[in-house]
Image: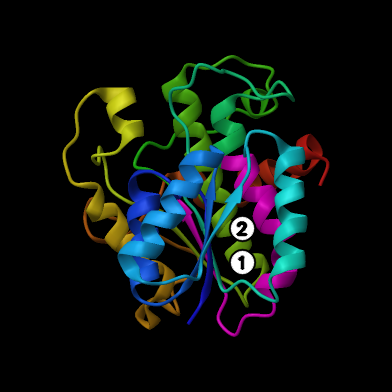
Amino acid sequence: MKTILLTGGTDGIGKLTAVKLAGEGHKVLVHGRDRQKLKNTVSEIQNSTENKAIIGHICDLSDFNNVRVLIKQLSEEYPKIDVIINNAGVFKSHISKNKDNLDIRFAVNYFAPYLLTNGLFPLLAKSNSPRIINLSSAAQSSVSIEALAGKEPLSASDAYAQSKLALTMWSFYLAKKLTHLNVIAVNPGSLLDTKMVHEAYGQYWSSAEKGANIVFDLAVLTKYDKSSGKYFDNDIGDFSHAHKDAYDTEKIDRLVSETNRIIGA
């Protein structure tokens, strides 16, 4: 059985995915932001699946010092991690910027996964078949480096779409740079029945189970062993093409360079 870190595991797609993984006997490290909600979620999953290897980890992903603390905790507590599912995301928020004056969408949806995953490379390296599943979106738009650095204000929808393209571009970068990793970006489906979608749009098209099912499959099924550097579009149910910028080497290199500068990597 695999040891799997899942961010944003107390709601929506993340929670449903955690239940499916736990039901198959995997050790699931469930991340959450609210301590009581995380405790309740872990207890609920343990009881419903009879799998006690469900462990909660608290972290505010908008706070990069918090992320670094989480990296240290995980590195001290576990000998390896087989899969990281970067699921946590934010669209609408009463907080527009984090402590570093970066847009909250960029901070949680892109910078935090970047920082967390890079910090856990040593644990992934100890796995026989390490995977990184990054939850992208059908909403992708060209990344403004000024906005990335917190110097250009964006609407919530623009910041969200740019953060998701940034995550996808970085996924492709990682897949090329670290060939021992299996890195897959996935659009879990448009307007799924989740809290984030309800807050943003007030309506939904499909059940959140649709998203959880594909995230589970991409995370553990052997049929996806050779899928690194690809983008799965669950709106069509197959691998497809992401935004054109995700294939632009110059833009990707600039994004990664600026990201390292901004977060001090």
Q: Which mark is residue 125?
A: none
Tell me if 244 is positioned left or right of 17 in this view. right
Q: Is residue 166 magenta?
A: no
Which residue position is annotated with label 1? 176
Mark 2 nearby-residue class (10 Å; few <14, some 14–19, many ≥20): some
Please, what secondary structure does the residue beneath circle 2 have?
Answer: helix
Find out whether the residues at labels 2 and 1 contact each other: C-beta distance under 8 Å.
Answer: yes
Residue occupying image coordinates x 55% and y 56%: 171
Would you say residue 217 is visible in this rendering?
no
Picture layout, residue 178 above or below residue 73: below
Q: Position of residue 122 (x, y in %)?
A: 75, 70
Q: Position of residue 222 (x, y in %)?
A: 39, 82
Picture layout, residue 55 above or below residue 228: above
Identity of the residue furthest to the bottom in this view: 128
Q: Determine the CA span between mark 2 and mark 1.
A: 5 Å
* Towards the viewer: 79 or 64: 79
Amino acid type at mark 1: Lys
* Towards the viewer: 15 or 259: 15
Mark 1 nearby-residue class (10 Å; few <14, some 14–19, many ≥20): some
Which residue position is annotated with label 2? 173
Would you say residue 122 is visible in this rendering?
yes
Residue occupying image coordinates x 74% and y 25%: 100
Amino acid type at mark 2: Tyr
Residue 119: quadrant of the picture = bottom right
Tell me if 165 is positioned left or right of 191 in this view. right
Please, what secondary structure does the residue beneath circle 1 have?
Answer: helix
Give the extent of the magenta segment: 110-135
Q: Position of residue 172 (x, y in %)?
A: 55, 58
Residue occupying image coordinates x 30% and y 32%: 197
